[in-house]
Image (spheres, grey):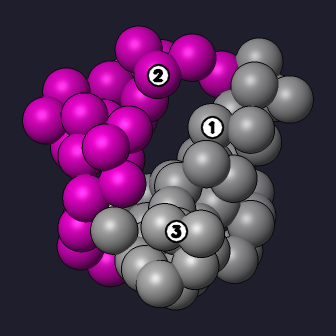
C-alpha cells in the first residue's frame, strides 16, 4: 500500500495510547484494523486521529512508493 500508518502507531506508543483506546473516541474495530493493515481510510478518520493525538496528518501517515517497498 502506498500509505503507511506506522507513524501513527509510533506516536500512539509515545503517548501511551493503545489501539483499544481508539474505540473510546468513536473509531470502530474495523477502522483500526484498516489502519493496522495500511488500508485506505477516509479523511474524517484522519481528522479524528489528529484531534485525538493533537497532531497533523503528516505526523501519523506517510506516502511510501510501492516500487521502493520491494527493494
- Which residue carries the number 1 mark? 9
Q: Report the span colored magenta.
A: 17-43
Along the line of sight, the residue nearer the viewer: 52 or 40: 40
Along the line of sight, the residue nearer the viewer: 11 or 6: 6
Write the residue at 30% across / 36% down.
Answer: 32
Question: Between disc 3 and disc 2, whose residue precedes?
Answer: 2
**20 lies above or below 26:** above
In this view, the mark in front (3 or 2): 3
- Which residue carries the number 2 mark? 19
Farthest-out residue, left: 30
Say if mark 3 contacts mark 1, CB within 8 Å: no
Residue 55, numbered circle: none
Question: Between disc 3 and disc 1, whose residue precedes?
Answer: 1
Say if mark 2 contacts mark 1, CB within 8 Å: yes
Helix, strand, or loop for circle 2? helix
Number of dots carrying numbers = 3
Left or right: 34 as drawn, with respect to 13: left
**9 lies above or below 40:** above
Amino acid at each position: 500500500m502506498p500509505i503507511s500508518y506506522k507513524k501513527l502507531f509510533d506516536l500512539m506508543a509515545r503517548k501511551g495510547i493503545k489501539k483499544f483506546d481508539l474505540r473510546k473516541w468513536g473509531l470502530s474495530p474495523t477502522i483500526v484494523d484498516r489502519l493496522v493493515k495500511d488500508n485506505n481510510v477516509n479523511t474524517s478518520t484522519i481528522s479524528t486521529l489528529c484531534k485525538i493525538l493533537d497532531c497533523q496528518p503528516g505526523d501519523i501517515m506517510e506516502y511510501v512508493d510501492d516500487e521502493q517497498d520491494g527493494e
